[in-house]
Amino acid sequence: MTTGRFSIHLAKSKKDLEAAQKLRFEVFFGEFQATALTEQHSAGLDSDKFDEFCEHLLVVDNHNDKKVIATTRLLLSQQKPADLSYIAQEEFAIPLLDAVQDNCMEVGRSCVHKDYRDGKAIQLLWRGITKLIFDHDIRYLFGCASFHGTDIDKIAYELSYLHHYQLDDAPHIARALNYQSMDRMPKADIDPDEALGKLPPLIKAYLSLGGVVGDGVALDPDFKTLDVLITVDVPKVPDQYHRFYRKQADRLTFEPLNA
């Protein structure tokens, strides 16, 4: 869909995918100093075994030669090979995924170019995500969301807020494999509004949709992040958000990037 300066597209070609991988490399490996591990990383592309099975959303700047300025990838249960785990299962035990085989979608590798982090790109990504939710009748949306950095004490306030106010209390609660508790401070010491304001935009977006957090935080030493697992039960999304995103999704058409 093209609406003025910015537009959102689904990757349909190798060129489209490489544009997403190039931005991911620039953000994760250039800006945030993740550890390069593969030949593709040496070529300036963030590529892994999951990419070929995912849908890739691209936000482009039509006033800057259709430069890809934001991306995320989505692994749908119906497109995932049976012998391939979800990405988040490398860091979290997720009993829900053992009980529910269909109608799940994992969000991952979300990033925005440093010159475009004013909220517009994230909004477009969420429009694309919600269109795929409705198009594919997704019940559970989930994924790892990251805090950049590996010092857990620096985000003790935010993690404690997530533990005390946003922890999933359902039987399918996820748990970090290399467990580190999010319970770093007493609940009485936390101002929920202040803590919410300190969270990364992606985590706030999940929570606004009624997302809940798994138990524990996982360290990703290669990407130099601390990750939490968030799950959204789509039928439980607050009505005002459900109506808004349904309307947005119905209006959205994914046009070819190079049309």
Image (cartoon, rainbow, N blue to C red):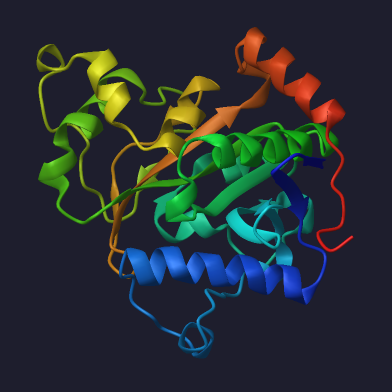
In-front residue for pair 198/235: 198
Question: Which residue appears at 30% of the width and 70% of the height?
Answer: 33
In what quadrant of the picture does the N terminus appear? top right
> Residue 141, how many percent across, how many down?
61, 37
Q: How many marks?
A: 0
In-front residue for pair 142/27: 27
Q: Is residue 23 left or right of residue 133?
A: left
Q: Is residue 197 left or right of residue 190?
A: right
Q: Is residue 259 left or right of residue 90?
A: right
Q: Is residue 96 above or below residue 82?
A: above
In what quadrant of the picture does the C terminus appear? bottom right
* Residue found at the far top of this picture: 239
Q: Is residue 171 visible?
A: no
Q: Is residue 160 above or below residue 29?
A: above
Q: Is residue 42 above or below residue 254?
A: below
* Residue found at the far front of this picture: 63
Q: Is residue 11 visible?
A: yes
> Residue 178, how many percent across, how many down?
27, 56
> Residue 120, how many percent across, how many down?
57, 36
> Residue 219, how many percent across, how many down?
27, 57
Residue 3 lies in quadrant: top right
Question: Which residue appears at 50% of the width and 35% of the height?
Answer: 119
